[in-house]
Image (cartoon, grey):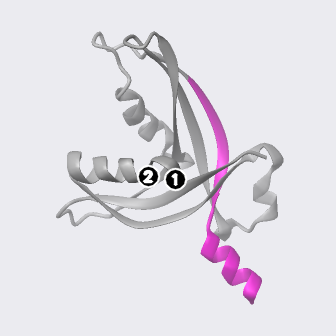
Amino acid sequence: MGSQKIMRCEIRRVGGTGPATERFVPLEIFGLWEHLMTCRHGFEVLKARASLWLDMEDSPDSAYGEAQYERVTEVTAFVYSERDGMFTRARRYFASDRCEELKRIFLSHYESADCRLQTHLRERPGVFLHRESALAETSS
């Protein structure tokens, strides 16, 4: 079973009054991502917490109750860099029910000057485990 350490957080425009939306970000790039979201894009990052993303290959959802996880899709883009003459990998995680919408935003960063997508995609369904839910249920 594949797993990845990721952060779950919420974002909202600075000064915004609307509801925040969730994001799932690989732990290894979270600091850089948070800096870009706050300094460049004008969002505030709220309620960040780390846990594991597990792929659905071994049906991890059968081992946990529905309150213990969220369905999250891993999207991997293999992006060709003209400058470097090679492919590189960009991996992101999206709430499965909003995957198509968020995937379009993510992929827009990799369009060429003539608006062609310069990438190959791979998607894997999985779950983000709620650590506090799991801890609360095992201690009762």
Q: Residue most toward the left?
A: 15
Range shown magenta: 121-140
What residue sits 68% from the left and 79% below the top?
135
Q: Is residue 48 or residue 64 the one in the foreground?
A: 48
What residue sits 51% from the left and 49% below the top?
28
Q: Position of residue 36 (x, y in %)?
A: 29, 46
Q: Is residue 59 or residue 7 the one in the foreground?
A: 7
Q: How many marks?
A: 2
Q: Position of residue 97 (x, y in %)?
A: 53, 48
What is the secondary structure assignment of the residue under circle 2? Answer: helix
Residue 105's label in the rendered image is none
Residue 109 is a magenta residue: no
What residue sits 69% from the left and 74% below the top?
134
Badge 2 local density, few (<14 within 10 Å), some, or many (20+)? some
Q: Which residue is mark 1?
A: 27
Q: Position of residue 65 (x, y in %)?
A: 73, 68
What residue sits 46% from the left and 35% below the top?
103
The residues bearing labels 1 and 2 have C-alpha atoms spaced at a distance of 5 Å
41 with respect to 31 (left or right):
left
Q: Position of residue 71 (x, y in %)?
A: 62, 53
Q: Which residue is mark 2?
A: 30
What is the secondary structure assignment of the residue under circle 1? Answer: helix
- Type of the residue with mark 1: Leu
